Image (spheres, coloured by chain):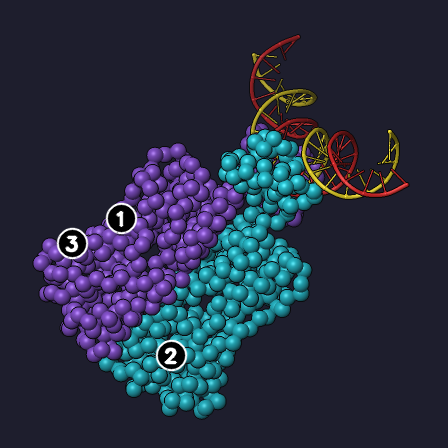
Chain colours: A cyan, B purple, C red, D yellow
Amino acid sequence: MPNIKDVARKSGLSVTTVSRVLNNRGYISEKTRKAVYSAMAELHYQPNELARSLFRQHSNILGVIMPSVEHPFFGKLLQSIEKHASAAGFKIMLCLSRQDAAKEIEYLQMLQGNKVDGIILSSRSADIQSHLNHKFPFVTIDRILNQSIPYVSSDNYRGGCLATQHLIDLGCRRLGHITGPQKLQLQANRRDEAFIDTCRQNGIEPIVYSSSEENFSNLDYYQDIEAMLTEHRVDGVFLGNDIMAAQTLQVAQKLKISIPEQLKIVGFDDIPLASLTTPTLTTIRQPIDEIGKYAVEVILNQLGGVVVPTQTILPVTLVKRQST
Amino acid sequence: MPNIKDVARKSGLSVTTVSRVLNNRGYISEKTRKAVYSAMAELHYQPNELARSLFRQHSNILGVIMPSVEHPFFGKLLQSIEKHASAAGFKIMLCLSRQDAAKEIEYLQMLQGNKVDGIILSSRSADIQSHLNHKFPFVTIDRILNQSIPYVSSDNYRGGCLATQHLIDLGCRRLGHITGPQKLQLQANRRDEAFIDTCRQNGIEPIVYSSSEENFSNLDYYQDIEAMLTEHRVDGVFLGNDIMAAQTLQVAQKLKISIPEQLKIVGFDDIPLASLTTPTLTTIRQPIDEIGKYAVEVILNQLGGVVVPTQTILPVTLVKRQST
DNA sequence: ACATCCTTGATGTTGGGCATCAAAGCAGCT
DNA sequence: AGCTGCTTTGATGCCCAACATCAAGGATGT
């Protein structure tokens, strides 16, 4: 790997001059500029970003911690984060925590050791405040850590209202809901509150199932769904995510419940799967792209010394399809 | 951010001694060791990995370039790569090229400038050989660049055979196939060859549609599927991936073609979607986890100076579900 | 007294940025 | 011709943070 000295030697100029060309600083004649460029090209020279970062005291790398990237929600979120980060000249260092609190803290320290310029955390576990360097550029997605750490999320409560009200408007009177595990302070839990509130406001007694941590990790909700559909004769269900909703379609078919005639189904997220099932799924669309965009923006603004909002809440929309 | 000097000052020792404690090298008395540890803890010190990498001439970072992470195949692949890399103490720098050849080359250079220890490329575009530093640890997934660059892939040809033979064994005689764009030297193209060969070997004239680049990017194959189903009265189709297969289910329903009675469908990949459709999809499972594992291994072995295979081909399996 | 081990530190690398000082070339002006 | 000031290049040295090499003092043993 050639370094700046090699370029200097090759072009017959000094390191100082090469550095000046590289950084476009001071006086440089057209002739030397060309000489340097051609030497760089010949040697396939590339400035060592480690050395640059070390000197400049910033690396142009953002750390991203998420539990998984298999789940389409996170896949799309990551896609969006990468897009906006790379457009701003930042690279991504990716960490998948797999819901493992210890691993998450490990990653957090590792990223700080690697001098990333900011961290985007979209995670379910762990109390991490003590491992966070004070004033380090940081943002969480869908997760409140404390009042001073900014977070970005979609309007989960409103999503829950939209979904529930939609079912009620269509005439459903026995409403069910399945949610993820309740332990964590996720914004996603507000969907459940919204479901319960909206039911009560309409004089309906809500039926709520909470899936186990284990089933949640495995994306296997069949038992919970079947339990709900057989124990209660629901005519409308609001599921915590689209995967649950797709599985509900399958269980309904098995139980010979016709969709949407006997049972109406609303999911959450609007991942691509929602338009690939038969029937297609009515769902609440989260603006995932914008979530990623704002998360990156919050970091960049912190780096720029700009005051950033502690909460950024983005609107959701009801996407009506065949399951209702 | 405290550095090693601060620790040295705090503990009243020299930088050298602190470094020795950090790296467990040479003779250190128990007393100094403790003094250093307590100073480190007090300051919340973390070694600067940039500086370490600069000195050591390796960063313990792997670069990963893939077109997207929204597609479940790549999501799962990335998940696997991250898992195995992180188990070996490596971090991931992620680059999403979005099928953009220029961006891919940019990323390739950026990664080399950032001194990653190796690059895993899983991509569709670009001729990149000239931008590759000779002897740089490198591996591609599902893509042959030239004879000397190692690649890992699943046995696409055999997958095509399995799928086609399965349809034939079930009595199908009018077989169709839709494939992605043909331009690139992807291993995935061998699925098409396998389809054609297997048909011919059984005295069946293959019907093949090739989707446009654009539809492929948008994951929108409806037109091609509908064209195939209406123009030819196929009784069995083999689709290039599971998303195509799921969309085929939808088109079939719209055209009132019953699955699997009138039409049998086989997909490819076995992404989670395949078990979430109604009916569930018969498909060819790629061992995505192993692909990621071997890709990482090939890099690590190159780093270790071990001779690596230029081809690593992993077995596929037929997963029979309700669509056949 | 001398060898050997233990323990610590001073100094110099790693690749590149930058600031300072130095020096020369060249043009314009008096 | 001499002076001023702009342009262009280079040498030197210090910075970033960590680590390696060598050097040296102290303790211990024979």
Q: Which circle, 3 or 1, is nearer the viewer?
A: 3
Disc 3/disc 1 C-alpha distance (Å): 21 Å
Please report whichever mark, 3 or 1, sits nearer to the chain's N-terminal start: 3
Residue type indicated by callout 1:
Leu
Label 2 marks a residue whose chain is A
Q: Are marks 3 and 1 on the same chain?
A: yes
Q: Nearer the viewer, residue B316 or B105?
A: B105
The residue where tag 2 is placed is A282
According to the image, label 1 marks what residue? Answer: B314
Q: Residue at x 56, y 54 (%)?
A: A89
Q: Nearer the viewer, mark 2 or mark 3?
A: 3
Give amino acid for label 2: Thr
Q: Quadrant of residue C23?
A: top right
Q: CA distance from mark 1 to mark 2?
A: 39 Å
Confirm whether circles 2 and 3 share one chain: no
Q: Where is residue B22 drawn, in percent x and y?
A: 57, 38
Q: Secondary structure at mark 3?
A: helix
**Which residue type does callout 3 highlight?**
Asp
Q: Residue furthest toward the left?
A: B203
- Residue A125 in view: no
Q: Which mark is residue B197?
A: 3
